[in-house]
Image (tube, rainbow, N blue to C red):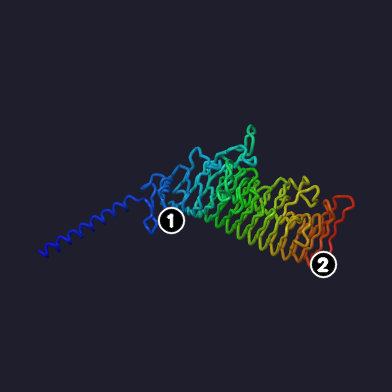
Amino acid sequence: MTSNRRGMRLATTVLVMVISLTMLTWAMGTVAASPAGGCATLKVPSQYPTIQGAINAAHPCDTILVAPGTYVGQLTIDKSINLVGSGAWSTIVQGPAVVTPDAFGNPWMIELGAGATVSITGVTVLVTLQCIIGPGPSGVLYAGGGIGVGGSAYLNLQSAVVTTTGGTEGAACGGPSSTTSGTLSYGDGIAFGLDYVVGSPSASALIGSGQVTGVAISGFGYSGEAVGIGGHVDSAAGSSATISYDKLTISSDATGDYSLVDVGGSLEPCSATIVHSVLMSSPEVTPNDITVAGGSSAYVAYNSIVAGLAGIGVAVAGSSATILYNSIIGPTSTFGETGVGVFEGGTATVSYNTIGQFECAYDPALLEAGVCGPNFLTQYQLAGIWLDGSGTVAATNNLIYATDAGFLMVDGCSPNCVVQNNVITNSYDYGLAGVDGSYSIGPNLIIGGAYGVAAIAYSVDTAVTLSHVVMVGPTVAPFYYEVDFTGGTATITGTWTVLQ
């Protein structure tokens, strides 16, 4: 009798355990989300036919694996997930023929928000550009583009391609139409910080941040950037991004007012780090490679930068920047317009850069026509480094070659400009030039060129004071003087050495 009771209790225990395990298995099989204490992996298309469907089903920290193929559709990501493709040009996320605008009125193909931290790797983002023309709150409508990061979200984009459905920049749009009003935009490749066309969003809804690593970005232009940090017109302060080991290009079909990387385009302070990247404009186009504006800050180092026609390699306006160890070259074929390696109109350290090929006189026809030359009043000069009088800059230990003017300093910046220990070689016009104001120039080495140092009184008197400047073999004379108004004076004093 006792053994039967024991047997019944054992059988009951086993039955309960079987039922419990069955219920647990059923429960786990019906939940398409992270198990307690862990993260789940969701697969597209084997488990979910669309990427957005997998995003909707995911929980924070889940990973979505996307098999090779082309997936058409917009994506909205409002949770912290990892989106992993099978490799750029293997997994392609493509915009639909018509991209629906977001709540702010801008059509983004992929948009992040809700404070999410999102990692995207191993995909090609193929953007359908909308070419929208019309007024926004500040009179301009910016037409979204590829990836928009707002809502205080953070994007980590790695080993990817972001490009457009057009074969070349702007091919999907064809340029602005004379029959419409407003400003046309091809959109941004990636924007950290959003603009708005409708509504009154909070600042937190507009700012975004992140990093872009090992990404090739092309196909954007005409009022759109490869990477925009801080929006264009109606945005908010506080967006930031790190750009590293990337390749950003603009080719000959793009024109207009834009930059490859625009920091603080809405004139709200933002920040950026741009390192170990290639930024390249073809000779026919007119962007700045990097623009820092609106009280923003940037660290720009170890990049290879090729400027376009009349473009600027790195432009700093009313902002601060550290510009170190970059190679910055110009197109060398121009129409006599000014091109500059570094324009500094803020606060900056510009050191250990190699800057060259900003030379109007490279074109023999322009030279013969008198378009290019040393006369600041009547001719063009392209410069390696342009220092504006409003700036505070330390420009030291740079190598500048094959420019019309190695340094062109305008509107006075003494004692706020420290220019010393630079090597300037083969300038067509002059190695160092001060225009309108007072300048104190420290030890520098100038090799070749028509003139070593220039003092130009374009609208006010100019005084250049030299300290241990060495000039080797100027082909015309050590000094160039120019006075463009009655009663003006242009002087050069101090200590120097001329070696022939």
Residue carrying label 2: 495
Q: Amino acid at mark 1?
A: Cys
Which quarter of the image is occupied by the N terminus?
A: bottom left
Q: Position of residue 173 (x, y in %)?
A: 57, 38
Q: Are marks 1 and 2 in contact (CB under 8 Å)?
A: no
Camera-near label (1 vs 2) is 1
Could you classify mark 1 by the number of other residues whose Cα lies within 10 Å: few (under 14), some (14-19), or many (20 or more)? some
Q: What residue sits 54% from the left and 48% below the top?
A: 148
Describe residue 355's horizontal placement relative to residue 44 as left or right. right
Could you classify mark 2 by the number of other residues whose Cα lies within 10 Å: few (under 14), some (14-19), or many (20 or more)? few
Whether residue 357 appears in this view of the structure is: no
Residue 61: give its label: 1
Q: Residue pushed farthest left? A: 1
Q: Position of residue 111 (x, y in %)?
A: 51, 47
Quadrant of the rendered image containing residue 18: bottom left
Q: Position of residue 366 (x, y in %)?
A: 74, 46
Which quarter of the image is occupied by the C terminus?
A: bottom right
Indicate the secondary structure of the residue bearing disc 2: strand
Whether residue 423 appears in this view of the structure is: yes
Question: Mark 1 and mark 2: span between their CA atoms?
Answer: 66 Å
